Image: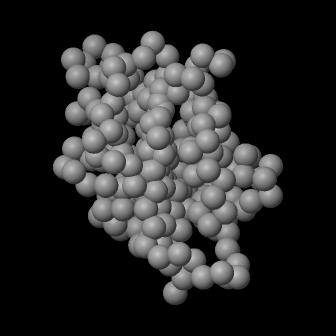
Amino acid sequence: MRAARAALLLVAVALASPGCAPKPEPAAPAEAPPAREQVAPRPAGRPVPHAQPAAPSTADPLATRMIARVNLYRAREGLGPLRLDAALTRAAEAHARDMAEHGNFTHVGSDGAALGARASRAGYRWQRVAENIAGGQASPDAVVDDWMASEGHRANILEPAYRDAGVGHVLRNPDRSRLRYRHYWVLILGEQPEH
């Protein structure tokens, strides 16, 4: 288990630098450093309302499993649950597809778009967003457990201000020439501005 966690793909925060090139495919799953973007700081003393989790019947079963696992860890820390957001899910699915199709593993899209631009393009109005990516793990539980063993990814998951989430997953046939991983995972976390 320790070797699998060590090989976990780095999760990127939206501010990850575009010059961070992916390393050759490891023998085991990997993770990328997390990515974060923020519009403006939340005023001090304002409570953070928490969204209700999405109903399992309305979401992809893998996305529902991933959010349930994330919410389990959040609950252990006394944090409110995340809910699946349709716009963030579109952004996460598009980025997972983009990474798989172009054989890359980064927080920057093949068109040069960083996380904030990708979330906005999908229709999410955000105050702050963060992204964790992973490749190689076969299940949502394995991905989330690996992220929780990584300081930056864990910080994204346990950020109290985040209420929304989107999940993207792509499973590719292993015989594709540019394929780095069989499974590509994207978790985007978001906070919308208060109206």
- Name the residue: 56% across, 28% down: 139
Left or right: residue 148 versus residue 59 is right
- Confirm whether residue 144 shows in the render: no
- Name the residue: 26% across, 29% down: 103
Left or right: residue 3 versus residue 39 is right
Give the vertical position of 17 relative to 53 (above or below): above
Q: Quadrant of the N terminus?
A: top right
- For this orientation, the residue located farthest to the bottom is 195
- Name the residue: 37% across, 19% down: 25
Q: Position of residue 56 (x, y in %)?
A: 62, 50
- For this orientation, the residue located farthest to the left is 111
- Confirm whether residue 114 shows in the render: yes
In this rendering, the count of numbered labels is 0
Q: Position of residue 19 (x, y in %)?
A: 28, 42
Left or right: residue 20 versus residue 71 is left
- Name the residue: 65% across, 34% down: 149
Q: Position of residue 22 (x, y in %)?
A: 33, 30
Give the vertical position of 40 relative to 175 (above or below): below
Q: Position of residue 2 (x, y in %)?
A: 65, 19
